[in-house]
Image (cartoon, rainbow, N blue to C red):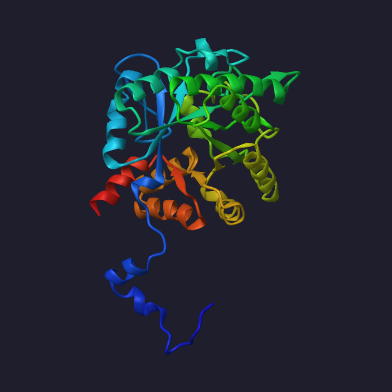
Amino acid sequence: MITGKYPSLRLRRTRKQSWSRRLIQENTLTANDFILPVFLIDGSNKKESITTMPGVYRYTVNRLSQIIDKALKIGIPMVALFPKTKNSLKNEIGSESLNENNLVCKAILEIKKKYKNQIGIMCDVALDPYTSHGHDGLIKSNQIINDETIEVLINQSLLQAEMGCDVLAPSDMMDGRIGKIRKALDKSNYQDVQILSYAAKYASSFYGPFRDAVGSKINLKSDKKTYQMDFRNSNEAFREIALDIKEGADIVMIKPGLPYLDIIKSIKDNFKIPVFAYQVSGEYSMLKYGIKKKLINEEAIFESLMAFKRAGASAIVTYFALEIANKIKKS
């Protein structure tokens, strides 16, 4: 509530000088706010560009230090691992997800061996990078089957925890998977492994470049609307998040980010739980394209990231993490 009136009250007074604007700013960005996604690829000594995501690369496990060193130096707390699995290793049931020599497992071991606990590791729990059909779950009679998929996700979670993953991030949107994964982790003495639930993940048009990056786009022949949320709904997000918190989620994720700022704010205000936002690949690539074509300037990146903080996000998964953390440090 504003107490006062013009002309005795002039809100522009505190905006006049840079030092004054800095003193009264309500939100700030630091490297601590960012999670850096890292894409993995088979082979050795490779750093492969992703055409639809300018400035983002896939790394072989033996070259991960190139990007992890940068993240650690600038103070980014955690990286998120996403594999591009060879098509020859994909099948209907995503069995490569349970292979202890898969890309994610090898990357976890490599990072823990070199960096110990200096940086956190977040691992995606879902089947879409491993299935020949590109979906996040098992298919039976042309339907994504919920409970059978959960059994695979439990085993995937236990394997990643065994390798040393710090934060398991189920992004599959199967009903009830958080509770069953938490129970299995606790039973296997992984009580300290965190669960970051993609609790409100929408069936969005903003995921295209990511699906290129992990190689699932060519496999996916239908949409994911039977398990991901309808973008028209907000109350449904409350129900999803309430269930996941009750089942044992430590943190919840809203995905995509910028089109769902209302959801981020509502969830933060009502549940008082750490809420992460995912600035997804489509958001990233649109900004990159606009900047390249001089339709907008680079300040738009800061503006978009600050919107997440203003809405209440505790942290942001963003492909801009290194770039913006470096700029913040130099400013």
Q: Nearer the viewer, residue 293 or 122?
A: 122
Q: Nearer the viewer, residue 159 or 6?
A: 159
Residue at the spot x=41%, y=83% of the render? 10
Residue at the spot x=37%, y=42% of the render? 321
| Residue 20 on image: x %, y % | 31, 72
Q: Residue furthest bottom?
A: 7
Q: Residue furthest left?
A: 330
The image quarter containing residue 248 is top right
| Residue 3 on image: x %, y % | 50, 83
The image quarter containing residue 197 is top right
Q: Is residue 75 left or right of residue 91?
A: left
Against 247, is 16 above or below? below
Residue at the spot x=48%, y=86% of the render? 4
| Residue 193 on image: x %, y % | 50, 31
Q: In which quadrant of the rendered image does the C terminus lie?
A: bottom left
Q: Is residue 109 left or right of residue 269?
A: left
| Residue 256 on image: x %, y % | 54, 43
**Tag count in the figure?**
0
